[in-house]
Image: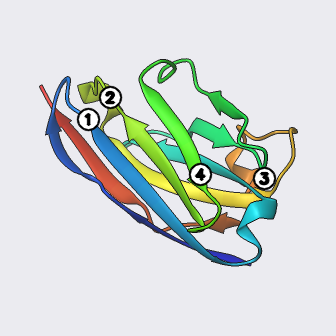
Amino acid sequence: QVQLVESGGGLVQAGGSLRLSCAASGRTFSDCGMAWFRQAPGKEREFVAYIDRNSRTYYADSVKDRFTISRDNAKSTVYLQMHSLKPQDTAVYHCAARIDSILAFTISNSYPNWGQGTQVTVSS
């Protein structure tokens, strides 16, 4: 089991930036593949970004070139740096953890561990 706590959300104007953090505890963080998902009101949870145990990164097309996922194994923390934010990025952002695998990392049901989420609101 991995316990996850997100922080860093808030209200920002379109074009602005935010950095989200997700602190992990429990299972060895360095063994985990880590992801960010988001869920807007009335919509399904969607994949945002994934970083594997070797720090290879993968992104949804909607955030590619604007968002950067990174990890600090010494701090057991994963980050999501967001630039050029758009109103359509407004959502609750959740981090998720699982045993690292290249398979199905965009599928939310493949993650047994979730944080409580942090709200990101982008005003136009």
Q: Earlier in the sequence, mark 4 or mark 3?
A: 4
Name the quarter where the N terminus is drawn: bottom right
Q: Is residue 75 left or right of residue 113?
A: left
Query: How far from the left and from the top, in percent, is residue 122?
Result: 20, 35
Residue type pointed to by label 4: Arg
Residue type pointed to by label 3: Ser
- For label 4, the residue is 71
Q: Earlier in the sequence, mark 2 or mark 3?
A: 2
- Contact, CB < 8 Å: mark 1 with mark 2? yes
Q: CA distance from mark 4 to mark 3?
A: 20 Å
Q: Residue at x 28, y 23 (%)?
A: 84
Q: Earlier in the sequence, mark 4 or mark 1?
A: 1
Which of the two marks, 4 or 1, is nearer to us in this view? 4
Task: Say what secondary structure mark 3 lies in.
Answer: helix
Closer-to-camera residue (30/93): 30
- For label 3, the residue is 110
Q: Residue at x 67, y 30 (%)?
A: 58
Query: How far from the left and from the top, in percent, is residue 35?
Result: 62, 48
Q: CA distance from mark 1 to mark 2?
A: 4 Å
Query: How far from the left and from the top, in percent, is residue 91?
Result: 35, 44
- For label 2, the residue is 83
Q: CA distance from mark 3 to mark 1?
A: 29 Å
Residue type pointed to by label 2: His
- Contact, CB < 8 Å: mark 2 with mark 4? no
Q: Is residue 54 left or right of residue 24?
A: right
